[in-house]
Structure formats: structure tokens, C-alpha cells
Image (cartoon, grey):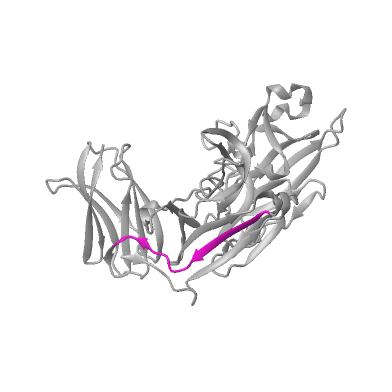
Amino acid sequence: MMLSTTAFAQQQVEDEVTMGASYTNHVFYNLETQDEQAVAHDLWDIAFFRNGLMDYGIKINEAKGWKLFEVGEITAYDNINVDDADDWTQLYNSSTDYTKGAFDQASDDGEITAGWGYYNTNTHHVIGSRAFVLQNEDDYIKIKIDDYFVGYTFTYAEWNGTAWSEDVEKTIANGDADSYYNYYDFDAENVVTVEPGKETWDLLFAKYTDIYYHGEFTTPNQVVTGVVANPNVKIAKTTNDEASTSDLSEDMNVIGAKDWKFLNDSFAWEVDSDINYFIKRNDEDTVYKINFTGFEGSETGIIHFTIDNEATLAVEQVAEGVSFNVYPNPTTDKRVQVVYDITATNAGQNQITIYALNGAVVYKSAAESQTGFYTQTLDLGQLTAGVYILEFKSGNQSSTKKIVLQ
């Protein structure tokens, strides 16, 4: 089966995004409407993930020049000395997970940890346990995250060159905004509007931290210019005309900052238009294919590309409205992902069963039956290495695939 769409009358659209000279703007882009929302990249300093009651994450604006350092236990906050900077540990925003930032990479070692703190199973609060310093050239801000429960309470002070200012304590409630993050500006001492609603964008053209590739060499944790994905989409990268559902990745940097653009021997930007990026929203059948056709660099920040809104993903149909695939196959860690797409509600229960070659059932698990696109991880560590048959059953119909555990 092929998943496809005819969302537009026009199959292929040529478009461009303008980030501005020196990439001064970050641009949120909607693939369906080609609407774009540009925002100056230096409007904010830190951001607090607010997507759910107990979802938490805190990132820094590395595009603005901020660096985050872990100083030590939260009790060290009152005695932080900028002369000890060489002893601090630098932390970075995640390059693959949009929901996790530099604060989340800290070293809290609680049983249920958020990096910057630990989850208290009695109060259901996340309690801060680490002290930090933010640095942007000669500007220093010491900060601690005191508590999280449906909002973040944090304390900070600014270095004036000789001493720390009086502490500022803030509580940023998650609120009811339809965005992934609440963004905070130290100068305004308040939340500022940066990110549009979650459902209004698919790709973000931005400066972010990732591996920088220069010829055969790489430098980790560098601020690069590229494209990151909304957590609500998955992307497959290929030079083939078609991709499979098993190629889809949740990593935000599948497009990223490399491969599709590169500096040639004359240090001029070129693009590889043979690379196809297949993009699928988690809750829709629509599949888009993007090819980049031009990158003008920092002089204008203009990026050219085409969008094909009738792209397809290859999956195997089990029954009308149900398709699935399995990856990786073979698997070296005895864990496989079953990717399945349900476009029509099935009255019966979908089920995954694994058989040994002698016909014995060695694993069984229920699968979702409501419409949606799902990825289900099967941990088959209890099975011996070898060949097995995986059956995906929907109602009275089923389909099988051979899987290899190494």
C-alpha cells in the first residue's frame, strides 16, 4: 500500500523562506498552506516546555549567544564565583529532541531525574537540585530552578562586574497558550511571544546547536543554521524516489544543517537537490516531499525549495485502512519498532503476535485500533537469537513479516 494525499490541487509548489541577513529571524513554516511566521531570534533568553501537566524541559537561546554551565549542587548557588568558571561544566540543548534543552542535560542522579532536578513521588513536584550560570560574552547570570508543578519557579541574579544583583524569583505557569514553550526575556523580566500554535507549523528554519561538518572533519555542539522539525512530524531522508514508513524518524534534525547544503571548494554554498525529505504529520495521512534547490547564505538568509504534496510512503496493507512495517530488521539488540498507520477505525482489536518457526507463540501484544500513526517498541530480549515470524492481525485479516534477532 502507498500512503498518499491530494490536499492541494497543485501537486508541486516552489517556495522560499527568508531568515534575513546573518539569519536574524527564525521562521516557523506550514507545509500545507506555505504560511510562514518569522520572529527575531534574539527576543528571548530561556524557554520552558509547557506541553503537558508533567512534561518538563528548559532550553537556552544558543542562537543569541547564551552558554549554560552547571556549577554544582543547588546549595552552591549563594557562593558562585565567576573566577571559578574553568571548573564549570558546559551543557547544550539537545540536537535531536525539540522538547529537551541544556538544563535537562545536568547531572542530577535521582531515580526519576529531570537533569536539573528530581521528581518527588509524594508531592509530584520536580525539585531543583543543581545550580547554573548562563554566560553571553561578559554577561553572567546565576540561576537555579527551584520547583516545577504545572509551571516553573526559578531564581536568578545578574553579575555587574563586581557583585551579584539582588535575586529575582519568578514563577512561569504553563498557562493555556497553544505552544510547546513559554519564552522568557531577562531584560523584560517577563514571558514574550515567540512560538506559534503547535498545529500551525511543521518546520522551523533556525540557528540551533548540532554537529558542524567541515569537509572530513566535525566539531560537536556548534551553532549552525538549518531546519528542525515539529515534534508532531516524522521525517525520512533518502536519495530514492520513494521512502518507507520504517525510514521515518522522530529526530528533529533529520533535515538539520548538513548534506542538503554544503560549501564547495570555492567556499560558495551549494545544495544537493537529489536528497528527498519525506514528511508526515503523526495524526494525518498527508505526506510531503521537500527538495532544497538553493541556499543564499548569510547575506540574505534565503532558502529555496520545492514541496510535493502528493508524495507516498511504502507500507504493507493488512486490511482496509491498516498498514504496517517493522524496523530495524535484522535487529542486534532484540528490540524492534512496529510502525503502523490506521486510517479507519476497526471494530476488532488489532494484535501483534510473534511465532517461532515451529509455530509456537513466543510473544503477543495488543496494538492500537483507533485511527492514527503509531510506533510500538517490542522488547524481545527474552527470545534467543534466530528467525521468527511477526504477524499483525486486524479483525479477521492478518499479514506477516519475517524478523531476524541477532
Q: Where residue 373 appears, x then y in whole percent?
A: 41, 60
Question: What residue appears at the point 29 percent right and 38 percent down from the top-left corner?
Answer: 381
Q: Identify the image quadrant of the N terminus.
A: bottom left
Identify the residue at horizontal 83%, vertical 33% (top origin): 159
- Residue 106 at least partly seen: yes
Residue drawn at x 39%, y 53% as measured from the top left: 375
On the rendered structure, is 370 left or right of 66?
Answer: left
Q: Which residues are magenta?
A: 301-316
Dividing the picture into quadrants, the one containing residue 379 is top left
Looking at the image, which is closer to me, 173 or 187?
A: 187
Looking at the image, the residue that sits furthest to the bottom is: 9
Give the mark count.
Answer: 0
* Rendering quarter of residue 71: top right
Q: Would you say 295 lies left or right of 248 here?
A: right
In what quadrant of the picture does the C terminus appear? top left
Front-most of residues 266 and 54: 266
- The picture places residue 99, in percent across and down from the top left corner, at 57, 48
Can you say whether 186 is above or below 162 in the image? below
The verdict on residue 140 being magenta is: no
Judge left or right: residue 124 versus residue 331.
Answer: right
**In the image, residue 362 lies at what x, y percent?**
21, 45
Q: Quadrant of residue 345?
A: bottom left
Which residue is most to the left? 358
Give coordinates of residue 240: x percent, y percent.
38, 55
Q: Main secondary structure of the magenta part?
A: strand
User: Is residue 149 visible in this depiction of the protein?
Assistant: no
